[in-house]
Image (cartoon, rainbow, N blue to C red):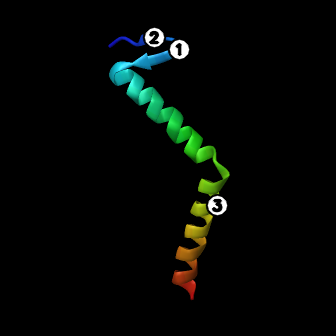
Amino acid sequence: MYLTDYKGCASGTEGQLIRAMRTLKKILSSQSFTDKVIDFYIGRTGEMFG
């Protein structure tokens, strides 16, 4: 499998994987996503103990 490079953006199956990884990295590094995960975790642990 080869990466096809066009203006700095890979295309094809490999390009889709690279774009998906970049998008996931942006989501994981966003503060709002982190806040949602923390809120979810606190809610779940509160149900276990409360």
- Where residue 39 appears, as percent x and y from the top left, is 60, 68
- Where residue 25 appears, as percent x and y from the top left, is 56, 39
Label 1 secondary element: loop
The answer to whether the residue labelled 2 contacts the one labelled 1, judged by CB atoms less than 8 Å apart, is yes
Foreground residue, 39 or 48?
Answer: 39
Disc 3 or 2, which lies upstream in sequence? 2
Quarter the N terminus occupies? top left
Label 2 secondary element: strand
Q: Which residue is mark 2?
A: 5
Q: Residue at x 58, y 46 (%)?
A: 28
Q: Which residue is mark 1?
A: 8
- Residue at the farthest right position: 31
Decide: few, some or many residues near mark 3? Use Cα within 10 Å; few <14, some 14-19, many ≥20. Answer: few
Q: Which residue is mark 3?
A: 35
Q: Residue at x 57, y 88 (%)?
A: 50
Snapshot quadrant of residue 13: top left
- Answer left or right for 2 relative to 28: left
What's the residue type where badge 2 is placed?
A: Asp
Label 3 secondary element: helix
Disc 1 or 3, which lies upstream in sequence? 1
- Residue at the farthest bottom position: 50
What's the residue type where badge 3 is placed?
A: Asp
